[in-house]
Image: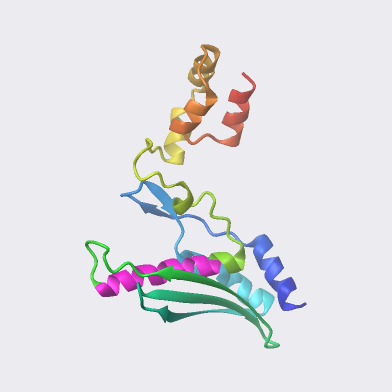
Amino acid sequence: MTINQKLSTIQTKFKSKKSRFNSFGKYYFRSAEDILESIKPYLLEMGVAVTINEELIATDPMPMLQTTAKLMDDKGMEVQAVAIVGVDLNQKGMQTPQQFGSASSYGKKYALGNLLLIDDTQDSDATNDHGKKKFTAPKEAKQKLADIQKAVDYIKAGGKIEAIKAKYDLTSVQEATLTKV
């Protein structure tokens, strides 16, 4: 099996849950550590190894880190993906090592995400509204909409499903039910 076939197999099967919660932004996310832990079962199975390297590539006007995630097989073949992040030295509440550490973690997460084709369209960076929208955790939303009849009555009375979706995280079943009303 070629390195590209091995990578394709991993990309197709790979799952990494968003098991961490950001209480400030009110969202779930996955970290680089979560991704690395999730890929471990594939390493021996597929005969590959994963490495991550970081390099300071610029310092002006701000430090820039280039993170390279690499998948290598036992034949010496490799595939890599890169992420470039800036280090915000003006970030309040953090000392310089924390600022670099934060950028490093972010770079690792996105280099791995690029390599493994992790779709982050539902990730915090894509969906974070910075407190402008009422947050309801998925389990809470399911409980609140368990009595779907209230939502059905709302739509029958002229309400819009978009308003419900803006306030609650609907499951695909709930959304399909409401769309049929």
Total numbered circles? 0
Task: Provide the major secondary structure of the magenta segment.
Answer: helix
Question: Is 123 covered by the magenta stretch?
Answer: no
Q: Nearer the viewer, residue 123 or 21?
A: 123
Q: Residue 134: where, in percent of width, then height?
A: 37, 35
- Classify residue 91 as left or right of residue 167: left
- Classify residue 118 as left or right of residue 166: right
Which stretch is magenta?
A: 96-112
Q: State whether residue 31 is above or below residue 101.
A: above
- Classify residue 21 as left or right of residue 46: left
Q: Residue 161: where, in percent of width, then height?
A: 54, 25
Q: Quadrant of the N terminus?
A: bottom right
Name the quadrant containing residue 73: bottom right
Q: Residue furthest front?
A: 61
Color encoding of the figure: rainbow
Question: Is 106 covered by the magenta stretch?
Answer: yes
Q: Nearer the viewer, residue 93 or 13?
A: 93
Q: Residue 100: where, in percent of width, then height?
A: 33, 73
Picture residue at 51% right of the left edge, 11% below the top? 157
Q: Residue 14: where, in percent of width, then height?
A: 62, 62
Q: State whether residue 120 is above or below residue 170.
A: below
Q: Quadrant of the C terminus?
A: top right
Picture residue at 76% right of the left edge, 78% below the top? 2
Picture residue at 55% right of the left edge, 64% below the top? 113
Name the quadrant containing residue 76: bottom right
